Every structure is written in C-alpha cells, then in structure tokens.
Amino acid sequence: MKVNHYRTVESQPVTKEGAHGCRVRGLVGPADGAPNFAMREFEIEPGGYTPRHSHPYEHEVFVLEGAGEVYEGDTAHPLRAGDVIYVAPNDVHQFRNTGPERMRFLCMVPNSAANAPVTAAPECSVATGKS
Ligand SMILES: [Zn+2]
C-alpha cells in the first residue's frame, strides 16, 4: 500500500507536441508496482490544453477543479468540477481549460491491455512511451 499526498509528487510540464500550459503528476503507476493502472493528475492553466490525440486504450477522468471542455473529435463537451469522462479507445480527444481558474483533473490509464504491454501516453505521463 502507498498513502501519499498528491502535492508531495512534483509536477512536470507536459512536453508532448500540441500541449500548452499543462502539467502532470504521476500519482500511482508502474514505479509503485501497480500492475494494471496508472493515476495521473493534470493541471491546465487558463487557455491551456492537452494534445489532440488518440490511442488504443481508454482514459477515465474526474474533473477536480475549474471549467473547460473536452473535445470528442470536433465536438466540444463542456466540463466543470465533478464531471466524469470516459474516453473510449481510439477516440480523438483533447482537454481545454476555457475558464478563468486553473483546471485540475485525474486521469487513469491501464498499464496493459489485451495482455499486451501498453505504456501511459507521454502527453499524460511522466514515463516515456508512445502515444
Ligand atoms: Zn489521451
């Protein structure tokens, strides 16, 4: 077991092309010995966004603070604190902070899918891997 406060984990800038004003903390993941899932916390500054991208695994997202939108392809869905988002495998998606405050959300990804190793996408992760 691991019990930790998220602020003890240093946030890192999301450097993947297409990201702006976005930082990530790797809260739980393979480095902790977690065999199946990684939990990441994202902070997006006003006007910031994650890369528009897709991948063959899902995201499970919980919005903690702020307001913004998530793009599903070209369709924007408004977001606010408390919203829960399931991004299905291969959905093209992007998170944008359209509000005046910092936007924070948790994003879970599987470490593996269909018995094949899948790493967390670098846009979302402190680990290296392919998106
Ligand atoms: Zn993604």
Image: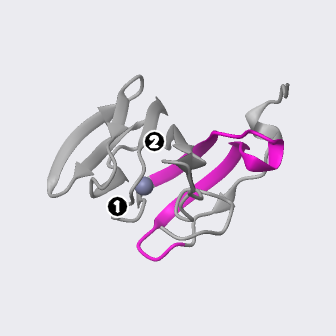
Q: For the residue labelled by badge 1, is the local secondary structure a helix, a strand or a loop?
A: loop
Q: Residues within 10 Å of mark 1 (few under 14, many from 20)?
A: some
Judge from the rendering whether residue 32 lies leftward or rightward of residue 62; answer left or right.
Answer: right
Q: Establish whether ligand 1 lies closer than 8 Å to the Cβ of label 1.
A: yes
Q: Quadrant of residue 35?
A: top right
Q: Is residue 99 left or right of residue 5?
A: left
- Amino acid carrying label 2: it is Glu
Spot occupied by residue 67 in the image (x, y as percentages of width and height): 36, 37
Which disc is residue 38 wearing? none
Q: Which residue is mark 1?
A: 54
Measuring 32% from the left and 48% from the top, which residue is drawn there? 98
Q: Point out the frontmost of discs 2 and 1.
A: 1
Instruction: Give the residue displayed 74% in from the left and 39% down from the top.
Output: 34
Given residues 121 and 41, the one toward you in this image is 121
Residue 125 is situated, as x and y percent measured from the top left of the image, at 61, 57
Residue closer to the observer: 111 or 22: 111
Q: Is mark 2 within 8 Å of ligand 1?
A: no
Query: Quarter of the image containing the N terminus?
Result: top right
Q: How far is disc 2 from disc 1 in space, using C-alphas?
A: 27 Å
Q: Which mark is residue 101?
A: 2
Q: Main secondary structure of the magenta part?
A: strand
Q: Which span is picked out in magenta?
A: 16-45
Which residue in the rendered view is the most extreme toward the left? Answer: 75
